[in-house]
Image (cartoon, rainbow, N blue to C red):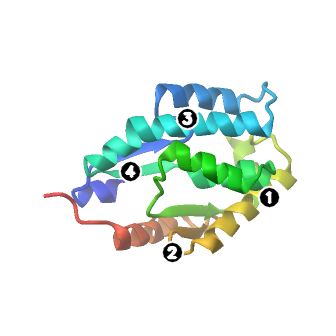
Amino acid sequence: MRRLRAAGHTVTETREPGGTLLGTEVRRVVLDPALEMGPLPEFLLYSASRAQLVAEVIRPALERGEVVVCDRYADSTLAYQGYGRGLDLGFLERVTQEATGGLRPDLTVLLDLDPALGLARAARRGQPDRLERADLAFHTRVREGFLALAAAEPGRVLVMDATRPENDLSADIWTAVAARRRPAPA
């Protein structure tokens, strides 16, 4: 974000779920390790949060000419609830299309990591959330889903090896962003 701002862009940073009052509450619910939740309610909660985020934050920022950087978006739903939980991808795509009004990112950066390493990193951060508590087979399916999405849209999804040093990743991500960004408004 620092480099985008230095290049004269106004940047809106957000995350999913989150970024709005509704999204913050959805985040609390879907990640609560004490709650049991089926795949469909989980998906619908994420979709409600996403619809609110697009309407309240993302679309207005884009209309103002800002750059929007979102930690997770619709690809996460396809990977987690589709590949991971087994919900029908066509259904997920249709609802997501409605929730977002068809808004898609110009660039998605996928930080790829072996699921066992990712779970170990999460465990070092402290108490695992509801998704982090899912078994390795689930996380393996999620990773396979993300990689399938990247293979289907290699021009939009940039796959980065998340075991590389942070400075190297940052430099490569900036190169990809710089190649796609529009000039800052005057």
Residue 74 percent location from the top left of the image = 58, 51
**Residue 31: image location, x then y, percent:** 69, 33
Q: Considering only order in the chain, which callout, 1 or 3, is on the residue closer to the N terminus?
A: 3
Q: CA distance from mark 3 to mark 1?
A: 24 Å
Residue type at the position of mark 1: Arg
Front-most of residues 163 and 72 = 72
For the residue pair 167 and 176, the one nearer the viewer reads as 176
Type of amino acid under label 3: Ser
Contact flag, marks 1 and 4 (Cβ < 8 Å): no
Residue that label 2 marks: 155
Q: Is residue 130 visible?
A: no
Q: Is residue 106 above or below residue 27?
A: below
In terms of sequence position, does the residue under pointer 4 or pointer 2 come before the other? 4
Question: In front here: 101 or 169?
Answer: 101
Mark 4, residue position: 68
| Quadrant in which residue 58 is drawn | top left
Q: What residue is shown with label 3? A: 49
In percent of the image, x 32 and y 59: which residue is there? 3
